[in-house]
Image: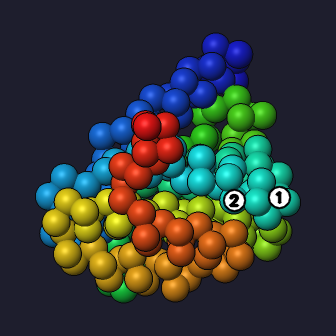
Amino acid sequence: MTDDQYAKGSVSYLMEMGALKRAKRSGWWIAGVKDPETIAEHSFRTAVIGSVLAMMEGADPARVALLCTFHDTQETRVGDIPWIGRRYLRAAKNEEVTADQVAQAHPAVAAGIQAVVEEYENGDSLEVAVARDADKLECMIQGLEYLEQGYSNAREWVDSTRAKLKTASAIALADAAQDMSSIEWQRVYLP
């Protein structure tokens, strides 16, 4: 392939990632949330949470943020399949989807993205553990926000994701989050 073809393949991947800004996290529909956040919104806050958790746990914040950023990118092709749906569907592995997504990208881009997804899916490092906790903690915090908005069925998501946290820092943040409103952060700055 030529440099122009690799550039086009890489940009095609970037354009595909734009679909994550429009795709809703469908699991929340089961809880009755009419207009849930997008996959991109979830991934952004997951990366921020992952960075914070990494700092608290002594992991590499940049590595964790990278893992978090790419953890749901396959959902442009397979959608956001809720856990109950996974019982009935046999979706391709995220590594397979990623390989197809980057097949026409620059070889360094393809190899780099595939390595990140492979690590997230199969790794056992502290960074992977922190990234996975960040994903769960983001879901829990989002659930708390939906509870504030009156979606009482979100309680199940809050409790089930909270129970799956592994790192001490994620558990500590989850405990703190359960006693806060989503606007409490501004009280620190307002007299």
**Quadrant location of the C terminus?**
top left
Quarter of the image holding residue 173? Answer: bottom right
The residue indicated by pointer 2 is: 53
The figure's colour scheme reads rainbow
Q: Amino acid at mark 2?
A: Leu
The residue sitting at 31% across, 50% down in the picture is 37
Vertical side of 172 occupied by 20: above or below? above
Q: Amino acid at mark 1?
A: Ala
Seen from the viewer's position, the closer of residues 57 and 92 is 57
* Residue placed under numbered mark 1 in the picture: 59
* Residue 120 seen in this snapshot: no
- Which residue is at 50% across, 79% downward? 162
Where is residue 171, by image quadrant? bottom right
Q: Position of residue 45 (x, y in %)?
A: 51, 48
Q: Secondary structure at mark 1?
A: loop
Instruction: Tell me which corner region of the image, top left, top right, bottom left or bottom right, holds residue 152.
Output: bottom left
Local crowd at mark 2 within 10 Å, few (<14), some, or many (≥20)? many
